[in-house]
Amino acid sequence: MLERMFNPKVVAVVGATPKEGKVGNILLKNLKDFDGKVYAVNPKYDEILGYKCYPSVEEIPDEVDLAIIAVPAEVVPSILESCGRKGVKNAVVITAGFKEAGNYALENKITEICRRYGINMVGPNCLGIINTHNNLNATFGRIMPPKGDIAFLSQSGAFILAVLDWAKANNVGFSKIVSLGNKAVLDEADFMRFLARDEDTNVIMLYLEGVSEGRKFMEVAREVSKVKPIVGVKSGRTEAGAKAASSHTGSLAGSFVAYRTAFRQSGVVEAESIEDLFDFSLILRKIRKIDGGIAIVTNSGGPGVIASDAVEEFGLNLAKFERRTIDRLREILPPIANVYNPVDVLGDADADRFGRALKIVEEDSNVGAIIAILTPTAQMDFIKASEFVLGIGKPIVTCFMGGESVRDAIELLKKHGIVNFLDPVKAVRSLNSVKRFELMKRKIEKEIESIEIEVDLVRVRDLIEKHRDKKVLTAESFEMLKAYGIPVPPYGIAKTAEEALKIADKIGYPVAMKVVSPDILHKTDVGCVKLNVGRERVVSTFYELVKRAEDYLKADVEGVMVQKMMPPGREVIVGMKRDPQFGPLIMFGMGGIYVEVFKDVSFRIAPIDRDEALDMIREVKAYSILKGVRGERPSDINALVDVIVRISKLSLDFDEIVEMDLNPVFVYEKGCCVVDAKVVLR
Amino acid sequence: MLERMFNPKVVAVVGATPKEGKVGNILLKNLKDFDGKVYAVNPKYDEILGYKCYPSVEEIPDEVDLAIIAVPAEVVPSILESCGRKGVKNAVVITAGFKEAGNYALENKITEICRRYGINMVGPNCLGIINTHNNLNATFGRIMPPKGDIAFLSQSGAFILAVLDWAKANNVGFSKIVSLGNKAVLDEADFMRFLARDEDTNVIMLYLEGVSEGRKFMEVAREVSKVKPIVGVKSGRTEAGAKAASSHTGSLAGSFVAYRTAFRQSGVVEAESIEDLFDFSLILRKIRKIDGGIAIVTNSGGPGVIASDAVEEFGLNLAKFERRTIDRLREILPPIANVYNPVDVLGDADADRFGRALKIVEEDSNVGAIIAILTPTAQMDFIKASEFVLGIGKPIVTCFMGGESVRDAIELLKKHGIVNFLDPVKAVRSLNSVKRFELMKRKIEKEIESIEIEVDLVRVRDLIEKHRDKKVLTAESFEMLKAYGIPVPPYGIAKTAEEALKIADKIGYPVAMKVVSPDILHKTDVGCVKLNVGRERVVSTFYELVKRAEDYLKADVEGVMVQKMMPPGREVIVGMKRDPQFGPLIMFGMGGIYVEVFKDVSFRIAPIDRDEALDMIREVKAYSILKGVRGERPSDINALVDVIVRISKLSLDFDEIVEMDLNPVFVYEKGCCVVDAKVVLR
């Protein structure tokens, strides 16, 4: 649907002006090389810079495919109306002064107009769009980047300016660039969907401060990632960053954990810095998969060692060479050369020796990718060396280290899509992004299993209706979990001491007794929980607890929960928090210090199938405890998987539940049991 | 003592030749701009390239300060002898073919000659040395770097070639460069000591594959770091890297943990990549201290947010502005600008607005350093902006993001020592290196306290003598620990069942019983330990254990250790491993999964004083367990401090002990007790 936006036959610049330095003037100038027709729109002129000028879009005697709008904010609605009447289907609104300046009403108004007329609008408050392949520069930046196959979507216009400037100096090419602006109509997902089918684009680079609709983003990204890689940086990751982001744009910042999880689950390669964003994008243009270990070929031991270190530290594998490779290398290399990986062809090697070693290494079936590292020596002809590199079919990156001596060779490599790094560590880091992409892609290609479990929807619906006025459910949350087949201990709620005794007699001793009160959330901390209560103490404990809660804490007491004391098991936590962007974010971790100090937890966005739940459990470092360490018996991991998928389902079925905290869950050799739980309603 | 090496009046090139492309030819050519006198040495010629040539060094009718030697390896000893007789005190041996090629004898020979004559020798097997300030290029590389204040010591000659090439293209200046080669006489520490007093040098950059003498390195680095920063990268960090390193040079790779610890304890800023090595060095040239928080001033929200994120992620602080700063910023900035940190002067800002904001932010007393981020906009004059940056007195780094538009401004900044980063994350990362340096320096300036503790040296000496033939001490290690005042449980070793009963009666029940045998190290795993043995079971347990060990495990049994069952406490581990380079490396960690899975341990190289020991304990994440979590009582941390300093002393007093493992140590509310221990002798 965006085909015409990027490949218009006719473009109109609304707000065009002959005044030097004005946006409406720059826009027109930037279109001088455009492979299509351009009209200016401004009631004050008949012609601007040699382009025919009309008082309004409607008066243009041609079908207009794209309107670029740079008029005062308050005029934008009428211009869009005019576009709508004229049948213009694509618009880029450069103008600022909408949501980002607090003018929500004005922004809503233009959104509504676009929806009404079916106008695909970029912006407002943006730099514009670029398609290098037809020379469409619909921005007010001063630079057109070289043609290339990277598409770049950015929520920051200023950042695009910096990137264009840098890209030009470094000869990095782009296919399409979109400054997303306020995303009043079109958002990143819409462009991603379009770019997936764009033949000029091999990789999509994202700079996001937030996404518009989390679920849509994930769904689209999952589909797109199957076809081409998306590399994204999300700013506002930390509290400080998020505060800065929200003072900068009007976008609703979801929690970063949710973003990171959403990226991973939908195949987006996360970059943590701008350098990574470029490095990963450049490498993923061509390399999507590494089948085998990494081989290093170098003329310099030192950097070879640095690369080996990095390979290990990133958890990649150094290829173990076949016997034959070692023999062949030994034949062509001097006796003191290292023929094992990393191969050191020595400082006196010329390009031929290097090239021969490269070829031999490539032919080793254990080698999946090659890092070629060269330092400038008297003997090394870098142009020749790069020609050898270009003859390699397997994934390869280079570290030609230096300045003047290596410049032309690096340019030659770049022309053929081979990425060079000054630093071997960065070369490895980038290959690791390929590995990350590969793993995510493999997971995405396996569809999420739909989960068939029996649950009592009606019971939960009733509970939510009944307790609508409460924010936090404690005792009632057990009821909810039971309805979804999640094991809780036998329990009952007693209004009187006699009832307490009756319940306890029924479930057996010892019991735990807890005050039920909407006013007391952290029951243990204020002494409103008694554990291991025997029959003789049930009645006195009842009175003691109620007295403490009512007299001392002035709490409104609904009763006392009498619950079977469960035998101690390994403690885990299962939690859910509904992210405003992405929906239910499910957490798993081993309890206590593992969560609190080591932050040893794993996250997934629902829905989660059994495989994914098992993955979540395995992902925490303390997983070994569940498997059984030091001769202890393993815990029932299946029972935990079951709890996780049921929590996933429960949180998807009921929007009203914004938070759940099952803490602790005791896991046994067989089965598990939620010992305490809390549910927060909207 | 190296003054004359770097500032010679007279230099002789031994092995000089008129043959193009030969090392002896390049060396001579590279000296053409040298501010001193040059002689060639070669019996075959009278003159080479216009330099007077003599058959031997001894025949030069002048006092020679430095000989640069490039003759076949087997001739090097006689040349050095000749230098010695002539009274030449400094030599650079370029020639390869010594230790690195397996010729240890030849290398030892030249070391001996140099020692005999007191010759300061660089190399052999090196690229040479450079002093830019008198145009001394005593290398066979083809590039002389620009003058500057970075000294660079490298164990890889090839890496120097790459750096020189890169530095020239990027206009990065150096004071002195040394290719360390095989370090047969002079090593990195010798040069570091010299460079500390070198007025042309403000920062020392190190590329090491290993150090020659660990203790000397640490001692020198500690002194030098008080004067100027050392930034170092150590290659061969991982197992893969270390394997590659040892196949590349003859240097003995100490464990990387020891290196990292040694760097930290002696003030060396560790870099993990080549980019970091440069970034950190460039910034530490000028910035040594950050007094206050980080302020960010930008014309572009997006990168500002990225920088804020990074500040938080690196554990630095964003400055909280004073009221007055906010008011002043509000006065000069448009109403929608962000006047809190990060300050966003907005995309339409000119250099003046940016400069005014910068000045106001600088004057805030909470601000310790500034990151100035600018993207290329129509309004921004980068040269003017950089002039404002140069007017700032507080530490400042810039991110002028772009290519052509920012190039000249970046050059101007560089000329004045201001470092520019394309990526805000790298700017923050580099500021963090300053913070790291500052913290290390503060610690180093506080001398290590000498520890006064009473120990029984004689007893340990006896034990070591007595058990010299054993490799691993188990039961005897308790005796050793006791002699050093480290608490162990009451115990005794029984040869017979009757003795076992007698010992147990004396120490009280229940007891633990363990087989004592040099053949059984992992006693628990093979069933040679019985816990909680009551009086009635002592005799039968004795027989059972001995039978199991002798009959079943065919072990040589020395007896059975009867040890008081200690009440359970929190489990910690204290260990020591003697590093071949740096000496006793002491480890502390909480036992079990914290060590095994989370690798939550801390290291120090002995000697360790009480402050340092406390630091070690606090450094582990699980420290909170010792402090007491969830209302539990705190453990006796002082008792642990005491164990650590005593282990430190014990390992320094006895070289023969190569490893100690106190695992577990039980810590109580008051006191602690080593429950099991193992000592490995050389």
Image (spheres, coloured by chain):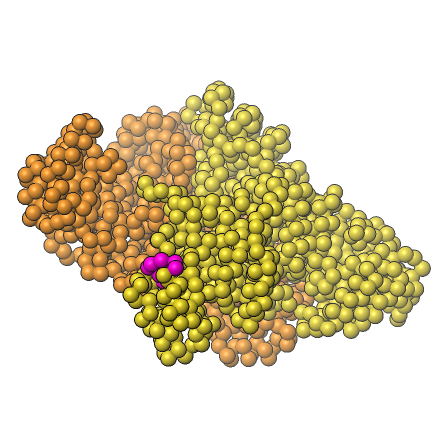
Chain colours: A orange, B yellow
Residue A629, position in %: x, y?
Answer: 33, 62
Between B416 and A3, the one lying in front of the other is B416
Residue at (37% x, 27% y) in the render? A101
Residue at (89% x, 70% y) in the render? B43
Residue A33, position in %: x, y?
Answer: 48, 44
Vertical relation: B8 (above or below) B352:
below
- Residue B466 in view, yes or no: yes
- Residue B33 in view, yes or no: no
B451 to the left or right of A70:
right
B464 to the left or right of A123:
right
Residue at (35% x, 73% y) in the render? B543
Is B511 magenta? The answer is: yes
Between B346 and A263, the one lying in front of the other is A263
Q: Which residues are magenta?
A: B506-512
Vertical relation: A159 (above or below) B388:
below
A227 to the left or right of A406:
left
Task: Give the quadrant of residue A552.
Answer: top left
Q: Quadrant of the C terminus of chain B?
A: bottom right
